[in-house]
Image (tube, rainbow, N blue to C red):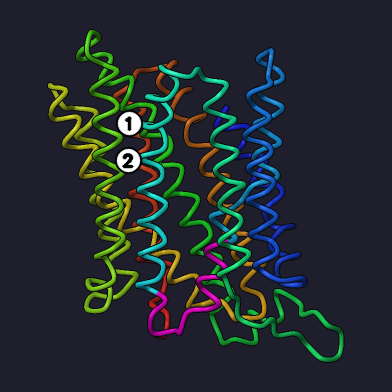
Amino acid sequence: MGSSAGLASAIVSPVWGLLADRYGRKSMLIRAMVGGGVSVAAIAAAQTPLQLVILRLLQGALSGTVAATTTIVATGTPREHVGRAMGLLSSAVALGSAVGPFAGGVAANYIGLRYVFLGGGALLLVAVVPVIVAVREAPLRRRVESGRSSLLATIRAAGPGSLVAISVLLVAQSLLQISWSGAQPLVSLRVLQLSPAGAAGATGLAFAAAGVASALAGISYSRLAASSGYRSLAALAAVSAAAAIVLIGIAPTVALVVVATFIAGLFIGAALPAITAMLGLETPGPVQGRVFGLSASATALGFGLGPLFAGTIAGVLNVPVALYTMAGFAVALMVLLIVGGREPAK
């Protein structure tokens, strides 16, 4: 299900990014929240697995709240504060990712799963109100002669190496998402192998710990980036996350799996905003909507491919080998940043 929504989002996100540059980033955020709210609520009406898959595809195509929010934050934040802003945004997303499944699971026990989807959709629609009232966006900058600018031409005009730097960062986001989104369902399988009786509680604890760790890392990473640089920090975080994912595969106890998942979440929580901040600093303002649309597409592609790769490898071979493979994607990310990346001007 997650793969279908991710792949749908990967296809559609560049279009939303283009529209954001032309018609305003705030309008695209409102569109994403309304589309996401309606599509999530509609899942409650699904009667068959096929209907559920179709509605998940629709959700992936119509939502994109994080990408739209990231574009507004990147374009409206002074350059010297972009790193900290990306960290705060990443922390908010991580906390939501940790609290949401927990709250939904508890609510499902009392009101039923269908009402959880209805409530989630309603909350997203209600959240549109403060966006409409309080959010302001930086004015769109357009070319006078045509009212629009060529994406590639604008990026090349920003300076030598800008196109390569942005391309590397987009690939980096896919690799990071493949590694982490692929490792997460494997944590559940690993816990199930070690302790079938207590798998549900231990898995929930592991994911909650990872979410809290990512939130803490997002808040604090900018101080380290200021001294070591974004690229070095992201590369170090990627290889450290790879080591933690390997530890999940070799851990002999559930407690160690939970600890390793916490550590992985901590380093993923540092790498993600660092790469996003680099992308924001490298991208010229007039095309940031389009570039962050591509960023959302790259992230969604990784979100779709990660569980697909992990599940296939776990089914054909075993869970530890699948975890080692996901760690390999994180190592590939580290190599990519070191070999092909560069430190953006602050």
Tell me the residue that label 1 is attached to.
323
Give the answer, above or below, for where 121 lies relative to 17: above
Relative to 158, is 218 on the left or the right? left
Residue 101 x/y as whole percent: 41, 32
For marks 1 and 2, give the CA distance.
6 Å
Quadrant location of the C terminus in the rendered image: bottom left
> Regarding mark 2 in the picture, which secondary structure is present there?
helix
- Look at 25% across and 56% down and name the residue there: 216
Task: Sort mark 2 into few (<14), some (14-19) or many (20+) by Cα contacts within 10 Å.
Answer: many
Residue 156 x/y as whole percent: 64, 82
Residue 181 x/y as whole percent: 43, 38
Q: Please give the range of residues in magenta.
A: 69-82
> In the image, is residue 77 part of the stretch drawn in magenta?
yes
- Look at 50% across and 17% down and name the residue there: 112
> Regarding mark 1 in the picture, which secondary structure is present there?
helix
> Residue 336 shows which numbered tag?
none
Q: Nearer the viewer, residue 128 or 278?
A: 128
Tell me which amino acid carries mark 2. Ala
Relative to 117, is 309 on the left or the right? left
Tell me which amino acid carries mark 1. Leu
> Residue 327 shows which numbered tag?
2
The answer to whether marks 1 and 2 mark residues whose Cβ atoms lie closer than 8 Å is: yes
